[in-house]
Image (cartoon, rainbow, N blue to C red):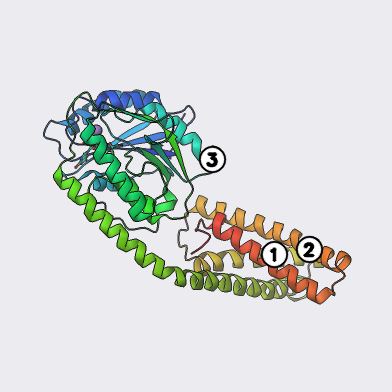
Amino acid sequence: MTQNNPQVSIILPTYNESQNIVNILKLIRENIPKGIYAQTIVVDDNSPDGTGKIVEDYVSSIKKIAENTIDIIHRKTKNGLSSAILNGIQNAKGETIVVMDSDFSHPPQIIPKMIEAFKKYQCDLVVASRYITGGNIQGWTIKRKLMSKIATTIAKKGLGVKTNDPMSGFFAFKKNIIKELNFDALGYKFLLEVLVKTKGVNVKEIPYTFENRKFGSSKLDTNIIIDYFKSVFKLYKYGKISEKQEGRTSIRFLSKAGRFFTVGASGLVINYLVSLLFADGISNLWYIHATIIGIIASMTTNFILNKVWTFSDLNFTITHTIKQYGKFVSFSSIGGLLQIGMVFYLVDIQTLTYPISLIVAVGLAAFGNFILNKKLTFKEKLWN
Ligand code: GDD
Ligand code: MN
């Protein structure tokens, strides 16, 4: 099987994991679901125990039989777990990102369940959770358990997070949900930052049992606990600021809708002019053919204007753009059909006049179109 783009990128931060890394890479490989092409990215911070070199050697030893790839990012110094994760994400080619530890605390057997959950539960973020029914922790001291509980409570009460295990280091998400975000990437709690900054995203939790590592040692120290409080404080402020901006959110939503309707109106003009041009002007085509050309022309200009102006999307990669164009045209066609149905209903069943019915039907169809394209074609959150 030769595919050139991985669908899933698995991020694996390492610091002194020489005794774990090769075995965890093997076990991950065994647990990549059939038919899925995955890229594993090890992010190593120049581990003194030689983890980086071990990965290099392992990768070159398996190269010839590998169909799923393993990449390694070498960073110069120990820069923290969250920042390593962020670095991995920035280099990820997959649409789906899985983040996990490399010390066997996060069982790779859960990966297929996480990947399956996106479709099954229509969600964009999957959290492997210790704190829901079926989840557990093995091998932690009472003290560490207590710290985890306290940190979890702070996140839930203080930041209003609904997820039961916001401290989990084991999670997966669709890359597009973080595309407009900036991260502090302080300390250990990358997931918490994602949860706070992606409000409105569908989250699904899957239970798993965390098993304390057998080899090597945890890197969680006092500095990381201090970083935790810093990051909670920052996220708290972030929440306050975005609450203030909520007011502005409605303005942004309305101005986008306004642009979408303006583009629609310009489409009508283009449709009319191009059809006339082809029927009488340049080529004397049969009027049905001219009409079809007019429709295609206006759908295309509508698409380009909405992409660039309404939704400020400047990504013109060929496959991406063609996919978007396909969706845009489908929604427009569905909108057209709905409009016909609605006019019929309003005129014939509700006995409204035709002009009034037409205004209502065009308005509703255009709004529906706006919502569908915002969410599905240009992948924006509904409300922003
Ligand atoms: N590159 C890099 N740089 N990797 C790091 C660093 C760093 O500075 N610090 C830690 N790591 C890597 C470790 O090598 C390991 O693979 C993973 O990050 C987790 O580090 P541990 O030190 O083993 O963390 P833990 O077991 O105490 O806590 C983990 O599990 C908790 C429960 O899911 C973390 O994932 C926590 O975030 C999580 O809450
Ligand atoms: Mn660990």
Q: Is residue 61 left or right of residue 46?
A: right
State which quadrant residue 211 falls in. top left
Image quadrant of ligand 1? Answer: top left
Q: Is residue 134 above or below residue 126?
A: above
Q: Is mark 3 within 8 Å of ligand 1?
A: no
Q: Quick check: marks 2 and 1 in contact, CB under 8 Å?
A: yes
The disc labelled 1 sits on which kind of residue? Ala
* Residue that badge 3 annotates: 121
* Residue at which label 2 appears: 342
Say whether disc 2 or disc 1 marks the residue closer to the N-terminus: 2
Quadrant in the rendering for residue 20: top left
Along the polypeptide, which appears first: circle 3 or circle 2?
3
What residue is drawn where x is 23% and y is 52%?
A: 229
Q: Is mark 1 on a helix, strand or loop?
A: helix
The residue where tag 1 is placed is 365
Q: Residue flagged by tag 2: what amino acid is it?
A: Met
Q: Element at badge 3?
A: loop
Distance CA(mark 1)–CA(mark 3): 28 Å
Residue 157 position in % (x across, y down):
35, 52
Q: For residue 303, say whether it is visible.
A: yes
